[in-house]
Image (spheres, coloured by chain):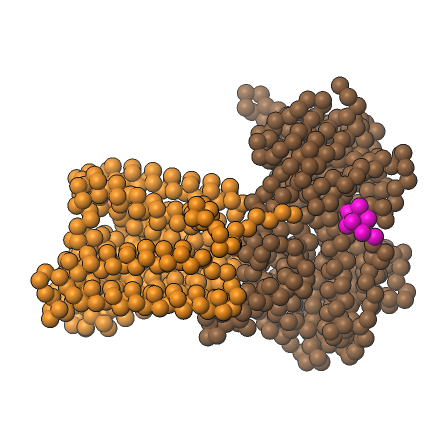
Chain colours: A brown, B orange
Amino acid sequence: MSEYILEVEHVIKDFPGVRALDDVSFRVKKGEVHCLCGENGAGKSTLVGVISGVYSSSEFEGKVIIHGEQRFFKSVKDSERIGLAIIHQELALSPYLSIFENIFLGHMETRFGVINWDKLIMASRPYLKRVGLNENPETIVSKMGVGKQQLVEIARALSKKADILILDEPTSSLNDDESERLLELILELKKEGLTCIMISHKLNEVLKIADSITVLRDGKSIHTYDTHAQEVDESMLIKGMVGRDMTQRFPPKESTVGETVFEVNNWSVYHPEYHTIKVVNQASFFVRKGEIVAFCGPMGAGRTELMMSIFGKSYGHRSEGELLIHGKAVHLSSPYEAIKMGLGYVSEDRKDLGLVLIQDIKTNITNSSLKKLSKLGVMNSYAQIKAAQEYCESLNIKTPNINQIVRNLSGGNQQKVVLSRCLLASPEIFIVDEPTRGIDVGAKYEIYCILNDLAKAGKSIIMVSSELPEAIGMAERIYVMNEGKIKGVLEHSEATQEAIMHMALVAEGKN
Amino acid sequence: MKVKQSTSEQVTFLELAKTNVRNYSMFLMLALIFIVFSVLTGGVNFTSRNITNLFIQNSYILILAVGMVLVIIIGNIDLSVGSLCAFTGAISAMIYNTGLGMVPTLILSVLIGLGIGMFQGFWIAYLKIPAFIVTLGGMLLFRGLTYIITNVSPISLRDNEFRRISSGSISLEALHIGGLHYSALLVGAVLIVLYLVLSFWSRNDKIKNNFEVLPFRYFVMKLVFTVGLIALLFYKFADYRGIPTVAVVLAVVIALFVFITKSTILGRYIYAVGGNAKSAKLSGINSERVIFTVHTIMGGLSALAGLVFTAYMNSALPQAGQLFELDAIASCFIGGASASGGVGTIIGAITGGLVMGVINNGMSLMNIGADWQYVVKASVLLLAVLYDTTTRRRSGLV
């Protein structure tokens, strides 16, 4: 047996109309942390699908060799059997079951089909300890944060005696602190002899933990770096991913800030189920013409809840407070009214809340603006096609044509479709919630340019972001939130990562 | 990324057939089933009389299927339509027996149906009770109310005028020459001319706006085929009694709802809400109102179907409409609608309904009882949906 635990040789995988993987080869040594980097649509997720049996061995060309033996998986079950475990970007836990039930789901030990619950709870404890999750095993997983849920997923993988762990964007929905802990855990598990393959957009994380890094671009494996044999830095990886040098991470700003356009005063939002709990407490802020303001803070700070509640009461049991557009008080009781008053909202959850995945690009782009593209309720199909094509070109959506189903697009392109839909409705005040989540470096830069152009055109932009460098690089002012309250605001000149963290956390200490 | 596209003039017939076989598979299935029964019944099912009967016997299910497919597209289901048919059928008979004319009876009944649809739609859309439960309640409620208002005995109609809605036909006696109803042929000819003019007009418009069109020879082939079908159908009508009134009713309903689903904002909203209700709402679509509207429409169409069925039976029966909901639902799924919402077409539902109708009709002609008809229908339903889902998956649509 060779020193490689996993070898992928010359894999080619076609989807209808698109070649997702084009002659991809890479090898992973036993006991190392191997990272896969690449832009969206580079084929990372497809590659994981090929390795783990999501696509059966008859659906692609090339070889997958694990433990020195060529494997012909028919389904994910087959790959699990030989010790492969995947942790997907979207967590696959059963939300209403407890931690230990989730850990043993699918491989519960039984006696004549009868489960001994106490024994299972006992059995779950060592795994929880190993991943550093300090919770009662009987806790219902949906009651915990995403970070902890992720740990349950890993505990579950460990309980299946996996020796290869594949993590698909594991930190995309974690805050900095949680990410840090997860990365440490991965290094810890490596010491115990586990092989980890991690897909990530966050290059600093990759550089921190990777023993070797494979860069993919346009479905091809470009290069594998060994971080012990040579010095690897972010710019090398970026160059490989986008095929060009990225000198600047943020485009230069050219907008001039004008008068106050949108003002929110003492806005409180109540929890949709527990009606007495305030998710957002007395938030006040404003945004001016041509300005980008960012909202930072840890997960669960209430940023998304605040924005969705402003956008036509889309979140919460009820809300109170005052909204002023151009100094006039408005009541927005539905997203329809919010759009009519010139608001636009791009959700952080584009698959669930942003897009109709089974519809095509054209339909998705026009869904918010049908009144504009019709006469007396009858659609003008040419106007629709023209509008969709215009945005496909101006936002550089990579697709053969506008009749592609959006489900088949990559994350960055899906995000551009959501942006297009929002832009077509021509909002004055543009709320973008985590606009670059799960998007690669190249597409991120394009999205930043779009936002800057909008600001230049005199629109006001409210950006919710969990990535501090992004907020600092893009925004004129940064509002810092935590525990449902706005803790303070920082001007562009005084904003540093430390200052933001300090504002969020020190104020937290007072409570 | 490589992209395979076949848009040039040089596209071969085989390629075209391959890319379109999914879209036309339902029609092929219908044609195939029809031909099989033609052989099995020695051509009886192809006679002019039987073709007219096919329309009359299936009209109410087809009307229901039109509404049902909308309900299924928004991701709901309506179990109450059968009971609603009985209820509105009984009410229409009672209204008619008070001495009111046919048109006011029709309008009043449909209005009552719309009202009932609004009632159910309100529970579903605004009180957020699952449609399955609300319409299950409706199924029991309206069956009960039908029994109450009819005293569980049939209501006969005051004269034969009502009956004409289903079994009557439209024909000018002056043009009834030598056994052929020339008025039907005339209408057919007018339709063909209209169809041709519209096809060419829309093609030219597309070319003018630089949009992709079928290569000219395939365009002509498609026209010839469709014109042939229309001509054949109207010849069959002319050969028997003229155009059945119910075919006209059906045609109006189908045309109206094809237009609504394909070319109106409401139609786009229906598909958007069905595809992803949460995203539709954040796109500024009033999802509740769309759901409410669809269930209201379903109520109105149920009333129309109830009326047609009453006319067909020539009396309002308290136990009318049993299992209609299941036939209507099956039609939609045979016609390619998706149980998870967002997918489905009016034409698909109609084709699905006709598939079931042709099977029923053919087996009846062969003197095979209802028992075996159920078995065959079940198999067709399962196989059709299996085919649909597998081809969909293979082409990466879902």
Q: Is residue B148 left or right of residue B220?
A: left
What residue sits 42% from the left and 59% below the top? Answer: B216
Front residue of B222 and A108: B222
Q: Could you say which quadrant of the image residue A87 lies in? A: top right
Q: Is residue A240 magenta?
A: yes
Q: Would you say residue A225 is visible in this rendering?
A: yes
Q: Residue at x 59, y 26 (%)?
A: A115
In the rendered image, the residue lying farthest to the left is B178
Up-down relation of residue A264 to residue A159 (above or below): below
Where is residue B225 shown, x and y percent of the image?
Answer: 32, 55
Give whichever of A72, A90 is nearer the camera: A72
**Residue A487 is at least partly visible in this image:** no
- The image position of residue B181, as x and y in percent, is 14, 64
Residue B389 in picture, x, y percent from top left: 46, 43
Residue B393 left/right relative to A498: left
Q: Which residues are magenta?
A: A239-245
Q: Is residue B262 left or right of residue A246?
A: left
